[in-house]
Each structure stands twice: as structure tokens, then as C-alpha cells.
Image: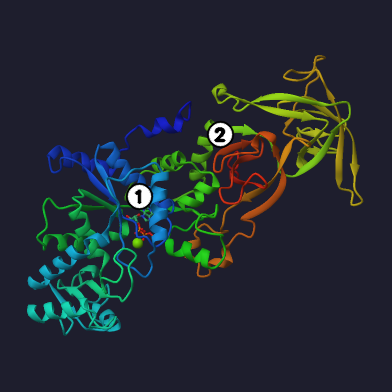
Amino acid sequence: MSNTEHGLENAENIRPHNFITQIIDEDLARGKHKEVYTRFPPEPNGYLHIGHAKSICLNFGIAKDYNGLCNLRFDDTNPLKEDVEYVDSIKEDVEWLGFKWAGEVHYASDYFDALYNYAIELIKKGLAYVDELSPEEMREYRGTLTEVGKNSPYRDRSVEENLALFEKMKNGEFAEGKASLRAKIDMASPFMVMRDPVLYRIKFAKHHQTGDKWCIYPMYDFTHCISDAIERITHSLCTLEFQDNRRLYDWVLDNISIERPLPHQYEFSRLNLEGTLTSKRKLLKLLEDGIVDGWNDPRMPTISGLRRRGYTPASIREFCRRIGVTKQDNVVEYSALEACIRDDLNQNACRAMAVIDPVKVVIENFEGEEMLIAPNHPNRPELGERQLPFSKEIYIDRADFREEANKQYKRLVLGKEVRLRNAYVIKAERVEKDANGEITTVFCTYDPDTLGKNPADGRKVKGVIHWVSAVHNHPAEFRLYDKLFTVANPGAEEDICSVVNPNSLVLKHGFVEQSLGNAEAEKGYQFEREGYFCADSKDSHSEHLVFNLTVSLKESF
Ligand code: ATP
Ligand code: MG
């Protein structure tokens, strides 16, 4: 993947080609549709995750590429699991990803009256009936993949009786589970979804949009197709597990008097990301079990977690572009996601110095202080430069010094020289240790004639290490994140707690250079030789800087 100059932005301007754009191109060419109208239909029962990003980029991306429109519609037919907190977070995530929905936000619950009337229409046509089988009986009657179902004894009620009973359902005269409205299709259909699917169920629950108005709620399959048709959606894109449901989608629309042309459903494969969960329900479990500190914990594969971790909207859109859209089920390697943010930050993040595991260095022949200047980016002068105070005492990383080492070790070794990044060449002269034998201070000398140039006598100094002034700096907490799970497919685990990586978060305390005192939350930096980091949006403030590791500098194996 080329990533020169404006890499990510450039790639985004190329319109993707996949089986869905091919269908759209044909539909437009044939005049089946004049414009393209899509929708993104989340259920507000959790925060959005990276899998949803794929669907968002597809739906909003198509609208953008074809000068069409894309609605944001909350699929809110299950009041028990839904909440306005989720509605708000979903809106925020879609906007943050860089997309704009057409007009106002829509809710399936906006259509509850219309849906109710379409249900009446089906009853009047003899295509729906009120069933009084218990949920268990209904399951028994449904049959299996190898065995046809049986008709309910209530299936042949008259239209009048069904209308009266449905009215009773609506008025709260049945208890939950005592009655439901079912489509009258075919109990012997090879497609289970066509075996008289339930259209309405009773739930005495307050709804976040409609309050106590309803005690009957429409099912997904009945709601979705009608919502699409009401909104004049042309291409209704969903994941492959809804393939069979397309028959019901078409059956409902074919049998009600709703404006034509009708929307059509197309299925694509869902995103599965190695080592992560892409199910709101399972992610909620991680919260409930206290494994993570919230939906936006930086280890979560949620959009808000990735954002807090330091991912940019462009990097997530680029990831979705790279994985493409097909009908093949597969698992994407986690490194593919990391490569996108690394490419973005390598190009766009300012460089800075941070010492994560500090050891003190005293430069014995340096007196006073000096203000050095360092570029913010090695090959983008337009990103400016910063001041870097240099002093007699500095910190370097403990791993960057050894008393003895072979030639492979290109850092500071006793009796040898190394370059301090953006500063001078220093030589380690002696060390001081504590009672445990741990090095507390490295005493060095510096060569004053090496700022921005090699030693005059031609001495070769190979290594470069980073540092932070011990006088002018900010103490900082570093949160080093690793994979949340120890297995590739945590979703398949019976007991998710047993596969949580105990080292998914390691805390370190060190120092960052002075210029980072007011680092903006979520803004990415490359801490030289350490990795890409950003200030934490929740816990970082001027008294207590907290930096999250976004991604390592290079892919680790
Ligand atoms: P979850 O199990 O996480 O709740 P869902 O499919 O039930 O997922 P919805 O809120 O109903 O979640 O999803 C909204 C849209 O996002 C749907 O069109 C759905 O197909 C799509 N979507 C959900 N998960 C993925 C995924 N992993 N990859 C691609 N698209 C997805
Ligand atoms: Mg769902």
C-alpha cells in the first residue's frame, strides 16, 4: 500500500468497486433507480464497534460516492435492552467517523402507528393471525431444519376474531407471552423464518422514545422492511446472517399497500477481527464483569475505545476501505487495523520525547542550561519545530544503558559514546548503584562540538537514544496496552474471563518533554523510539498527564 504524502486521503478519493457498487451501477444504468438511498440501522443496545464501522463506511460511503443520501435509523423495537445513552453515543460515533446522515435522525419507533396499520392490513387479507400458543409450544410447533412444522390450532381464526384479539393485545388485555401476532405463510417452508413468523409480541415496557404508549412491539423482520420502504431506501445493506430473512422482507412488502418501487436487501459478510469480540451483547458482558473500565476503555474494539486509544477517523475509514466488501466470511488480522493507524500517524503525528522507564544521567562537564530546537516531523517542515531545554541532568530509558554490551547494542555503554536525539554526543564514564545493585545514576561527559554534526575528529557514533531534561519536564503515567484476549476467537469461549490477557494493561511512570504539558486529548504523537501515544481523554489533565499507547512503531511478531 503506497502511503506517500497524503496517503490516506488520496486512497479515500478512489471509489471502491465491489459486488454492491456493481449492482448499483446496473440499477442506475437500467433506470431502476434515479438515485441511491441507503441507511445505517443500529439497535441502540450498546456502543458501536469496529464491525459497525464497516457497515457505516459502506452505507454512508455509497451515499457519498453516488451523490445519494444515507439515513441514520435507530432500530428500536426492543425497549428492554435499549437506552438513550446508546442513541447519543451512536450519533457521536457516526459523526466522529466523518459522516453526515440525511435530515433528522430516524427511529423505527417513528413508524409504530404505520406498522400497526400494516399489521391490520395483513389481518384483513387473511395473512396474519393472533396465536395463543405459549412460547414453548410455538417452538415445538415450528419444527426443525429437517422436520416440517405444524399449524397452530389458532391459525384459522376468522378475520373478525383476529382483529378483535389484536386490538385486545394492543389494549393490554393479554399478559406477556399469552398472545402474539403471526404472519400466515407456510409451516412447511424450508426457510425457518417463513414458518409463520411472529410479527408482534407483548411487552409491558417503557420505551425510550414512545414511553408507555405501546405494550405491543413489532419484530425486527416486520419493522425493518417497512421502515426501509417508508424512507424510500433503494439498497438495504445488511450482513449475511440475514440472507434467509430476505424472503420475509420481500413477503411483507409484497403483501402490503406501500409505495413502490420497493427497497431491496443485499447481504455482505460481517467483519470478524482476530482476537476481538464484535457483538454488543458480549462487549456489555466485559463491562458487567469489570474486565474493562467502560465502553470506551482503550482496549475495547468499540469506536469510542479506538478513539480514546488514539485511532483517527481516517485510519478507521482506511481500514474499512482496505478490507473491502464481499460475500466471503473471513477473519481479518488485527495487524491490518494497526497498520492503518501506524501509516496515518507516521505521516501526521508530531514527534516528541518521553522516557517511560527512567534512569538519571548527569553530564558532568555541562553547566547551566541550553534551549535546543527540534523539528516536529523529520520530513514535514510545515509541522514546525519546538524548544527542547537541555540540562546537566537528564533522564534516559533504563534499557538504553548497559555496563557491558556487544556490538549489536547500539545504545549507551560504559566507556562508549552515543548521540542524544536532537542534542549532543555523550560518553558514559561511571555509574552509581543503590544497595540492591540497581543503577541509580549514569555519569557522563558530553562533546560540545556535536550539536547537529558529527565529531570533528571523525569518530563514528552509531547509536541515537532519546532523553528528557530532568529539570524541565512533566511526570507522566503511561498506559501500555496489549491484546485484551489470549486467543484468536474469544467469542467462541464459554468463560470469557479465562482468556483475558493479564497484561493487557501495564502502567509505567516516567517523564515527557516540556512541550507536552498541554497535549490535546486523543491527538497522536510519536514518542521517538517508543511508539505512538495520545493523552487520555478521560484521566489526563495538567496536574496528571496520562498517555495511552496507540500502537507500537513497528509490527511485532
Ligand atoms: P451486535 O451483535 O454487535 O449487536 P448487530 O448486528 O445486532 O450487532 P445492529 O445495531 O443491529 O447490531 O447493527 C447495525 C448494522 O451494523 C447492521 O446493518 C449490521 O448488519 C451491521 N453490523 C453489525 N455488526 C457488523 C459486523 N461485525 N460487520 C459488519 N457489519 C456489521
Ligand atoms: Mg442486532
Q: CA distance from mark 2 to mark 1?
A: 28 Å
| SS state under label 1 | helix
Q: For disc 1, does the CB lie below 8 Å from ligand 1?
A: yes
Q: Residue at x 45, y 30 (%)?
A: 7
Is residue 484 positioned above or below 217 on the image?
Answer: above
| SS state under label 2 | loop
Q: What residue did someone put label 1 on? A: 55
Q: Residue furthest right?
A: 435
Indicate which label's residue lies in the foreground, 2 or 1. Answer: 2
Q: What residue did someone put label 2 on? A: 349
Disc 1 packing (10 Å; few <14; some 14–19; many ≥20): many
Quadrant assignment for ligand 1: bottom left
Looking at the rendered structure, the kind of residue marked 1 is Ser
Work out whether residue 371 can be spotted: yes
Looking at the rendered structure, the kind of residue marked 2 is Ala
| Dot placed on the residue nearer the N-terminal end, 2 or 1 | 1
Residue 236 location (% of width, % of height) = 24, 52
Is residue 557 positioned above or below 12 on the image?
Answer: below
Q: Nearer the viewer, residue 398 or 82?
A: 82
Horizontal side, residue 148 vs residue 390: left or right? left
